[in-house]
Image: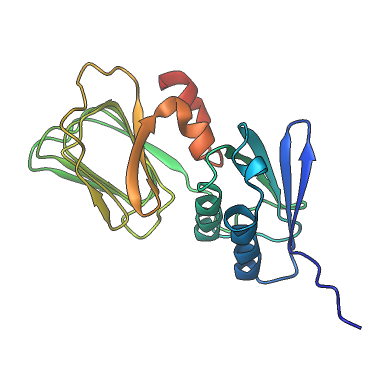
Amino acid sequence: MAKVVKPSVLIKGTKDGLLFFLDDNLPFSIVLNELKHKLLHENASHIWNGPDMRVQIKLGKRQITRREEQDMREIFSFRKNLHVHTLESDGVPYLLDPPRKMEMLTGTVRSGQVLTHRGDLLLLGDVNPGGCVQSTGSIFVLGALRGLAHAGSDGDETVIIAASIFRPTQLRIHNIISRPPDEWKESENHMRFAYIVKDQIAVDKMSHLSHIRPEMEWKELSRRFG
């Protein structure tokens, strides 16, 4: 008698959206492969191409790394109407990585100066053309970013770069480099942030942070400056 193989990804519809239950007994790579198959290859376009839906992900007793989370979010990103809202593990934080602390510094990074930092950085000041700010974590500039910003310098691809006035000469996240388009207007008064998606740097309004990086601990900044 053939053995029935239990699926590693179960999907349940609720009044708030979709619940994804991921098997915590199998290697996470196998779970991701099945998730990818369900979202990209199964003939369910009437679901995946429908209206916007909130997604809750239940990991069971499993904890995952930031890299594993990013791999999972990239799979969901292929379906534009699916928005990952929460990830949960039973009784423990879903992330294995210890949370980073944000440090606040004040001042102006002038031309020729390089400000380096470990962890997440909140800079109250400007980064002038020719200046550079580099951090292993995320970078928030509550001022004008008109120089170079390099976040995730030790390999973290989940970090972001944000600024009140977003006019960088160059952006780097991990080892990915992006030169911003010339048509960005100085008159744009929305705080903006850059992040990695599909191995490229994208830029969006800060008010969209909670949808793109809902796991981040600084959502209050999005509400205040978005």
Residue at screen point 64% across, 57% down: 42
Residue 139 visible:
no
Residue 190 visible:
yes
Residue 162, by quadrant, is top left
Residue 139 picture location, percent across and down: 34, 40
**Front position in the image: 4 or 74:** 4
In this picture, is 69 found above or below 108? below
Residue 164 picture location, percent across and down: 31, 24
Q: Is residue 37 left or right of residue 142?
A: right
| The C terminus, quarter of image | top left
In this picture, is 18 found above or below 192? below
Residue 175, by quadrant, is bottom left
Q: Is residue 123 left or right of residue 10?
A: left
Q: Is residue 76 left or right of residue 9?
A: left
By what rule are the colours in the image chosen?
Answer: rainbow
**Front position in the image: 8 or 162:** 8
| The N terminus, quarter of image | bottom right
Residue 168 picture location, percent across and down: 20, 35
Residue furthest to the bottom in view is 1
Q: Give the number of marks.
A: 0
Residue at screen point 12% across, 43% down: 113
Q: Is residue 85 left or right of residue 192?
A: right
Residue at screen point 36% across, 60% down: 155
Residue at screen point 71% across, 55% down: 59
